[in-house]
Image (cartoon, grey):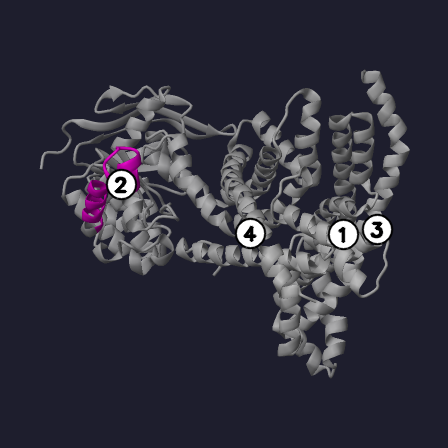
Amino acid sequence: MSEDLLTIIIEAVPYLLGGVGMTVACVVGAMLFGLALGVPMAVGQVYGSWAVRRLVGLYVWFFRGVPILVLLFLFYFGLFQIIGLNLSALAASTLVLGMASAAYQSQIFRGSMLALSRGQFRAASALGMSDGETIRSIILPQALRLSLPGWSNEYSILLKDSALAFVLGTTEIMARTHFVATRTYQRLPLYLVACVLFFILTWIGIRCLRWLERKVAIPGYGNA
Amino acid sequence: MVKGGNTVLRVEGICKSFSGKPILRSVSVGLSKGELKVLIGPSGGGKSTLLQCMNHLIPPDAGQIFLEEKPVDTRSKKALYALRQQVGMIFQDFNLFDHLNALDNVSIALRKVKGLPRSEAHERAAAELERVGLADKIRHYPAELSGGQKQRVSIARALAMDPKAILLDEPTSALDPEITGEVLAVIRALAQAGMTMMMATHQVGFARTVADEILFMQDGVVIEQGTPAELLAPDSGTRTLFFCSHLSGLEAAG
Amino acid sequence: MDTLPFLTGEVMPMLNEGLVMSLKIIIPSATLGLLLGIVLGTVRTYGSPWMRRLGNGYAAAIRGTPLVCQLFILYFGLPHIGIYLEPYQAAVLGFVLCNGAYHSEYIRGGLLATRRGQHLAAQALGFSSFGSMLWIVVPQAVRRSLPGCGNEIIYLIKYSSLAYVVTVMELTGMAKQIASDTFRFTEVFLAVGAYYLALVTIATFVLKKLEERFRIPGFGVS
């Protein structure tokens, strides 16, 4: 029995590791997409016109108020179809998680930007920099550094949310363990294996982000 | 007023070391009913540790505590809780409960330790707050009170428990000089009303006029002990006088 | 297209049923989760060394793994060792266990922020260690953790949608069923999205009011 179980798990390893690849692709993709979308959103919310601020506010309200599960169904089976976007389950999950993450990331960046003193902006303007240039080369480099701890947190949330992608048929860790579990009737051990895999990914990711934090650290700048 | 009669609180042979460094070396002191004793001495001399050993907030390494001449069994938690209910403590940094307004700060121990009903506890607490001149502040939270007001609330909190004695650990040293007076006035009134107290302080002028006895403490030992008149007489040549004249020079305490 | 009659006639009655089920999950989960969080946070801060280690390990395990995975273990996994839970029971248990771990983090932070003098002053008044904990230290910690714990409750509202994966017919489950029957995914999921938005918005408002109501000068910002 226990030998059986061991065999099952060992045989499932390559298959499950494929799932790890899918999960990592989904999370990294969503994080980068969220970053690309979240930074301009934060800039818009802090420095933009009234209309831009309202628009970003609305986006954030929507994506933070609706569960990931509902967003996945809504976009994959609904909105993406309507606009004729035929995506694979993996691509669709990544995109939806990325859109939701953008809402959260924009708030992290916004907080960091607001934490910067007004003086930074004024000093750059006094040197004759344009507003856009000031934001690009003075504000964002500081704000992004301040945002890194928040980003670690966002990574761990995204990683856990990515487990929901299985409802669209994305064959990531959860979907594959569920598949093996159902076929072999070794449910409890296999779900525990999935937990361990996620746990390891959380740990590795946070290590990487800490490393990044240290690498871009500037003496005298906030968190050690 | 008859003083020096029955002893309310007494400790004998109190020793305490922190990580190998002796802070108290076999200190013995007693407080008679209605007496105010003042502990004076350089910082780090063991005044605060002694006070906190006297109600066992800091467990001494050796020594015995007597409450009304009965030895306190410090191994029994019940006996300890009972001791602390009967011996009030005023801290240098007030330690008001930050989440409770003045009234609840004073009444919470009445309700939760003594088991008084809410209305009775509130009534008692309001009376104590009035006694320290804060009748108009009973709904204020600690963050809304000045340092002097906080310390007066903490005195009211101790008084509400009907303590047999009160230990005061430098009650004015965290206060701005101009408001120490309001706290000292409350303590003076208590002394005149016959409250038994032991107080560590650097307020020489206060000690001179109000204390029944001064204990001079240095390096964990009481090295001089006597009435203010004896120890602070200009020609006494005591360590106390030497120390106090320096303090007065520095702080202009009067 | 007959969107409006479809929504009011077919979708909303079923979603309302789902809403009731969602609330039946959220309310007990939020209450018990907070309680567990307070106990767990206290144990993790003041417990004996091995209790602390156990509590920290538990919180790390829960916080490091997806909630779906935890729910799968409870619903599909436990029968493996002879424990059978109803879908509803599995969902609520899962949410409480998970929520408690997250709350405990904030409570712990609140406890660590409570100054030592508070406990000392309570002892000086004759409070027992437990009494000081119960009446002085924990209430302050809870007050300090209110904003963080409030956020967790908002999360719980959204993650209650995961009850669907263990076959509870709450809001999301209902929506999935209607959508699969009618193939009108966009309308149905926009509608259910609106339900969640309303829940989250109302909860945010109520929590903010609560925070104001229990505001104490000197505690946190605002």
Residue B111: in magenta span: yes
Name the image quarter holding residue B111. Answer: top left
* Circle on res. A90: 3
Mark 3, mark 4: which one is toward the viewer? 4
Residue visible at 30% across and 21% down?
A: B72
**Amino acid of disc 2:** Ala
Q: Quadrant of residue B120?
A: top left
In the rendered view, does C39 fall on the left or right side of A12?
Answer: left
As drawn, the residue found furthest toward the left would be B1
Residue type (three-letter) at the residue carrying disc 1: Arg
Q: Which residue is mark 4?
A: C16
Marks 3/4 in contact by CB < 8 Å: the verdict is no
Front of the two marks 3 and 2 = 3
Residue type at numbered disc 4:
Asn
- Say whether residue C116 is magenta: no
The residue drawn where x is 76% and y is 50% is: A209
Q: CA distance from mark 4 to mark 2?
A: 57 Å
Residue corresponding to mark 1: A214
Mark 1 and mark 4: Cα distance apart in space: 51 Å
- Residue for badge 2: B158
**Of labels 3 and 1, the one closer to you:** 3
Circle 3: is it few (<14), some (14-19), or many (20+) Cα within 10 Å? Answer: some
